[in-house]
């Protein structure tokens, strides 16, 4: 039983050795050596080997003839294989030789294709880069030419379209980094140009205003020429009245000479075209800076800066010089600067969209109007020369008409001129007071001798005197009044002319002008001339003959009052019988002067009589008279006879009005 198990175990080990890989046979062999039947196993192993050898020998014997035949066939094929190998080697050599040129051509083709692809890629990249470079070159050229607004547009196009299409290149990055710096440079340069512009118009506003006022004066002159043609009939009547005026007009002693007729001498310039503000000032810096700041998105900043600077300049312009009232040129320069300032603002208003608006300009004008009127009231109050006041009035009218032509309201200026009219009237009264006193002091209080008809016509041209009896007398003859009468009458007319000159161009109606002239003339008669006559009458060492001549003179002046009424009506074209028309108080003025002269005569006569009686030494206790008058009484009677003889020169109507006690 034990030997059967051992044999089975040995059989298993042998099968395992036959079927197992030699690398794993170690454990199997160990189990054999661990057992007790080692020799028995070796015998079985030898027997198994012999069996296999016999099987191998049988197989080899069975296949040997086939193997020999195969070897024989293989030996036969070896020669053919050698030939085939030689042919293949030869063919391969030929193929290799022929392929070298093809490989060279293929390599060249590969290189060409590579270059072609690189060139195409380069062209594509350059196509995107060249516009960037051209645009940047254009930008640099515009910057050098100081064309900043086109440069800003180019910069915007470069940033938004060209650089994104070009790709990520170093020069594109450098350009992108420079764009903010270029924008800042353009903004700063344009602002610098704007500051230069503001400084320029501040310096040249005088010239701009002068030009604008010349334009306005030329236009007014043309309008007046058309109006004067339409009123040629009334104009001839006025000129006839003027030509029949006083000797003062012809001799050039008129206190208001021809120099008062105009502010600016433009006679030689009417034929030439006067340049406008846009011709004198280059506004391109403003437009350029406005467009640049608009593109940069900072338009509000620019508008606020511009308006702030112009407000500062307005305050400087509206500040008058301390000695402006001394000469007309000071006022002219002041007005020119204001007009120049607002001409520029009006041009900016109409040529830009929103840089300044109407409300802003009106606000500045209200400020200017209030400060200008205050300055004029202050400085004109220092003036005592009527010629300067009249020139100033004409200048203010031209100033107002110029700005009114640009759409600015100027009613307050004309209201101020009406206020100045009272001041002008007071200055005229002072000047005519001196003229009247000078005439009264220089008068000889004697009838005017007339030797020739020419002298008579000359005096008749100065004073409206009509006496048929005197006209029949032969030359030489005497006029009843002294030189005082025609001179005073001429001065009255000159005063009326002066008042009329101030009323011109104030946009007043004929009725208002007539009323103003009549009221001013009444002040001259009732206040100035009346005081001068009282001064002449009450003056010391005035003789009775002089007082009588004053009575005669005032009588003739009283008779000429209705001629003054007609004169005023002629120059104002207002009929004297108009309702509510102011009447002249000349009659009462001359009556009061004549009554004062009569009272003075009465006083002087009483004083003379008292002097005669006081000098006489009478015996008041004598029983009877001496039979003849004393020498004192004889002298008194002779004095009274000579005095009453002087009274015979008084005209009849004067005697009727006389109230000598």
Image (cartoon, rainbow, N blue to C red):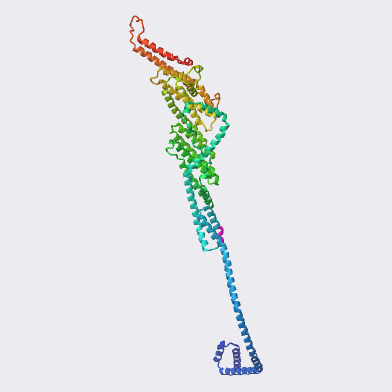
Quarter of the N terminus within the rendering: bottom right
Observer-nearest residue: 173 or 379? 379
Residue at the image point whose x is 55% and y is 61% from the top: 130
Residue at the image point whose x is 48% and y is 52% from the top: 189
Quick check: can you spot residue 312? no
> Where residue 353 appears, x then y in whole percent?
55, 47
Observer-nearest residue: 483 or 97? 483
Would residue 479 appear left or right of 113 to someone viewing this image?
left
> Where residue 72 appears, x then y in whole percent?
65, 93
Q: Which span of residues is magenta-colored?
A: 160-165
Q: Is residue 212 above or below residue 476?
A: below
Quick check: can you spot residue 386? yes
> Where residue 565 appears, x then y in whole percent?
52, 24
Observer-nearest residue: 28 or 584? 584
Residue at the image point whose x is 39% and y is 16% from the top: 604
Q: Is residue 8 magenta?
A: no
């Amino acid at each position: 039983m034990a030997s059967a198990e051992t044999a089975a175990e040995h059989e298993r080990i042998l099968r395992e050795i036959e079927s197992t890989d030699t690398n794993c046979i170690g454990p199997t062999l160990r189990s054999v050596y661990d057992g007790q039947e080692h020799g028995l196993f070796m015998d079985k192993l030898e027997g198994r080997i012999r069996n296999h050898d016999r099987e191998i020998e049988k197989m080899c014997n069975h296949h040997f003839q086939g193997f020999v035949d195969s070897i024989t066939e293989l030996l036969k094929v070896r020669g053919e294989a050698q030939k085939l190998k030689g042919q293949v080697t030869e063919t391969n050599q030929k193929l290799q030789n022929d392929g070298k040129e093809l490989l060279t051509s293929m390599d060249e083709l590969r290189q060409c294709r590579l270059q072609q692809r690189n060139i195409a890629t380069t062209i594509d990249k350059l196509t995107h880069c060249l516009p960037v470079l051209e645009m940047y070159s254009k930008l640099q050229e515009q910057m050098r030419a100081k064309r900043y607004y086109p440069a800003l547009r180019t910069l915007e196009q470069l940033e938004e379209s060209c650089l994104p299409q070009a790709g990520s290149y170093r020069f594109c990055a450098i350009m992108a980094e420079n764009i903010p710096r270029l924008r800042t440079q353009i903004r700063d340069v344009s602002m610098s140009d704007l500051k230069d512009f503001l400084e320029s118009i501040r310096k040249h506003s005088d010239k701009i205003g002068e030009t604008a006022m010349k334009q306005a004066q030329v236009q007014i002159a043309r309008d007046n020429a058309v109006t004067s043609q339409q009123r040629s009939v009334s104009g001839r009547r006025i000129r006839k009245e003027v030509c029949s005026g006083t000797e003062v007009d012809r001799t050039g002693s008129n206190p208001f000479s021809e120099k008062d007729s105009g502010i600016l001498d433009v006679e030689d310039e009417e034929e030439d075209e006067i340049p406008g503000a846009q011709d004198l000032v280059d506004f391109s810096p403003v437009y350029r800076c406005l467009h640049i700041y608009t593109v940069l998105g900072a338009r509000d900043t620019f508008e606020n800066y511009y308006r702030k600077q112009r407000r500062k300049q307005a305050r400087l312009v509206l500040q008058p010089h301390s000695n402006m009232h001394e000469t007309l040129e000071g006022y002219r320069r002041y007005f020119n600067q204001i007009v120049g300032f607002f001409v520029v603002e009006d041009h900016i208003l109409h040529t830009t969209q929103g840089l300044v608006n109407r409300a802003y300009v009106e606000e500045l004008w209200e400020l200017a109007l209030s400060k200008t009127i205050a300055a004029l009231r202050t400085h004109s109050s220092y003036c005592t020369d009527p010629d300067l006041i009249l020139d100033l009035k004409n200048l203010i009218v031209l100033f107002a008409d110029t700005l009114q032509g640009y759409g600015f309201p100027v009613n307050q200026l004309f209201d101020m001129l009406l206020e100045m009219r009272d001041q002008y009237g007071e200055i005229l009264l002072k000047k005519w007071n001196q003229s009247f006193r000078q005439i009264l002091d220089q008068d000889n209080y004697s009838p005017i001798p007339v030797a020739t008809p020419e002298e008579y016509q000359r005096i008749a041209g100065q004073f409206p005197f009509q006496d048929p009896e005197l006209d029949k007398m032969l030359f030489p003859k005497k006029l009843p009044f002294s030189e005082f009468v025609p001179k005073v009458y001429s001065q009255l007319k000159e005063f009326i002319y002066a008042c009329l000159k101030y009323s011109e161009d104030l946009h007043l109606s004929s009725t208002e002008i007539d009323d103003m002239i009549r009221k001013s003339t009444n002040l001259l008669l009732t206040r100035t001339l009346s005081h001068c006559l009282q001064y002449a009458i009450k003056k010391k060492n005035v003789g009775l003959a002089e007082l009588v001549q004053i009575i005669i003179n005032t009588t003739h002046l009283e008779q000429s009052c209705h001629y003054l009424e007609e004169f005023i009506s002629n120059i104002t074209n207002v009929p004297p019988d108009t309702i509510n028309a102011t009447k002249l108080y000349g009659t009462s003025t001359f009556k009061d002067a004549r009554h004062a002269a009569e009272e003075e005569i009465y006083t002087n006569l009483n004083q003379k009589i008292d002097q005669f009686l006081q000098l006489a030494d009478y015996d008041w206790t004598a029983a009877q008279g001496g039979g003849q008058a004393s020498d004192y009484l004889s002298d008194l009677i002779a004095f009274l006879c000579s005095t009453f003889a002087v009274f015979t020169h008084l005209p009849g109507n004067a005697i009727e009005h006389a109230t000598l006690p």
